């Protein structure tokens, strides 16, 4: 089973749900497990997806996902970032992205890249 972490900044949550719906047939496969930061996970659940929700990003959810990634428990990260807004948990975001590079984990920060990763998965 492959684990995909999904995260979206507030301004990108609707875009994340739209993306999830577009790839529902792939993401609801028995071979894929979704984990998420809290609020993004709630939005995904409302859209009908089964998601393991962790803390909200600003409360440590990004760090929780980074920890699982470092433990080898995450196979891909889809993180729709809002580059036009400030985020109080920016250090956690950079840590997560850095760990993706350190551990060679595919990371998509926009729908175009996420599409390529999901289609290659």
Image (spheres, rainbow, N blue to C red):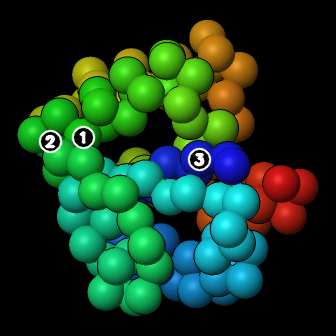
Camera-side residue: 1 or 48?
1
Can residue 82 be seen here?
A: no
Q: Position of residue 72 (x, y in %)?
A: 58, 22
Residue 43, placed above or below residue 114: below
Camera-side residue: 81 or 68?
68
Mark 3 is surrounded, within 10 Å at the Cα level, by few (under 14), some (14 to 19) or many (20 or more) other residues, namely some
Quarter occupied by residue 96: top left
Camera-side residue: 89 or 64?
64
Q: What's the distance in space between the residues labelled 1 and 2, CA to CA?
A: 7 Å
Residue with the mark numbered 3:
3
**Proximity of marks 1 and 2: CB atoms separated by less than 8 Å:** yes
Numbered badge on residue 61: 1
Q: What's the distance in space between the residues labelled 2 and 3, CA to CA?
A: 22 Å
Q: Position of residue 7 (x, y in %)?
A: 40, 53
Q: Position of residue 42 (x, y in %)?
A: 26, 72
Where the C terminus falls, by quadrant? bottom right
Which residue occupies 32% across, 65% down?
41
Element carrying mark 1 = helix
Quarter occupied by residue 91: top left
Q: Is residue 108 left or right of residue 82?
A: right
Residue with the mark numbered 2:
58
Q: Is residue 95 left or right of residue 25?
A: left
Q: What's the distance in space between the residues labelled 1 and 3, CA to CA?
A: 16 Å
Closer to viewer: mark 2 or mark 3: 3
């Amino acid at each position: 089973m492959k684990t995909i972490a999904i995260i979206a900044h507030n301004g990108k949550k609707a875009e994340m749900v739209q993306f999830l719906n577009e790839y529902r047939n792939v993401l609801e496969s028995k071979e894929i497990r979704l984990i998420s930061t809290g609020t993004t996970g709630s939005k995904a659940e409302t859209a009908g997806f089964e998601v393991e929700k962790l803390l909200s990003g600003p409360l440590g959810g990004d760090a929780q996902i980074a920890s699982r990634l470092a433990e080898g428990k995450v196979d891909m990260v889809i993180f729709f970032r809002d580059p036009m807004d400030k985020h109080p948990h920016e250090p956690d975001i950079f840590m997560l992205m850095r760990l993706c590079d350190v551990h060679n984990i595919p990371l998509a920060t926009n729908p175009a890249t996420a599409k390529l990763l999901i289609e290659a998965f």
